[in-house]
Amino acid sequence: MINQDQEIGQHQRDAVADICTMIRARGLHVNQPRKAVIRALVGQKQAVTAEALWINIRLTYRISISAVYNNLNLLVKEGVAEKMVNEGTKSTYRIKPDFTIHGPQSS
């Protein structure tokens, strides 16, 4: 099995660690499926569908599509990610561009 941490750079590893720290600080658990979704989403250069993320994660980790959706929805709810609803196509997700461990930056 490929270690997902080896496939992402230091900046992305730091982002994964920051997100996990924030989630734990809010009293939520960071289990392996959740961390796999966070790693995969942080590693994306552009917004991605849940299905594409699931396919990517399944290359190295056994996870259900429902676990991917549940974790994406939690990340959206916690202000880490955003869901973009596109007419005629599937919704896409990405880490919020202004996300910091303290929440979105104010302009």
Image (tube, rainbow, N blue to C red):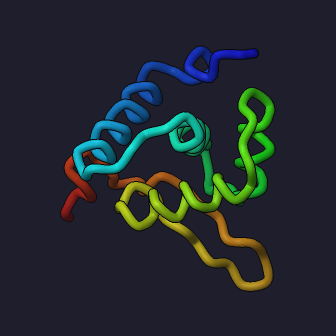
Q: Position of residue 32 (x, y in %)?
A: 55, 34
The foreground one among 4 and 48 is 4
Quadrant of the rendering where the N terminus is positioned: top right
Residue at 69% over, 59% down: 66
Question: How many tags in the picture?
Answer: 0
Residue at 65% over, 53% down: 68
Residue at 30% over, 42% down: 24
Q: Is the residue 62 above or below the residue 102 in the image? A: above
Side of 93 relative to 101 (left or right): right
Quadrant of the rendering where the C terminus is positioned: bottom left
Q: Position of residue 14 (x, y in %)?
A: 37, 27
Residue at 59% over, 15% down: 6
Q: Position of residue 61 (x, y in %)?
A: 72, 31
The foreground one among 83 and 63 is 63
The foreground one among 43 and 50 is 50
Q: Is the residue 13 above or below the residue 103 in the image? A: above
Q: Quadrant of residue 51?
A: bottom right
Q: Position of residue 94 (x, y in %)?
A: 54, 55
Q: Is the residue 96 above or below the residue 91 in the image? A: above
Side of 20 relative to 45 (left or right): left
Side of 102 relative to 33 (left or right): left
Side of 42 relative to 28 (left or right): right
Q: Is the residue 65 above or below the residue 1 in the image? A: below
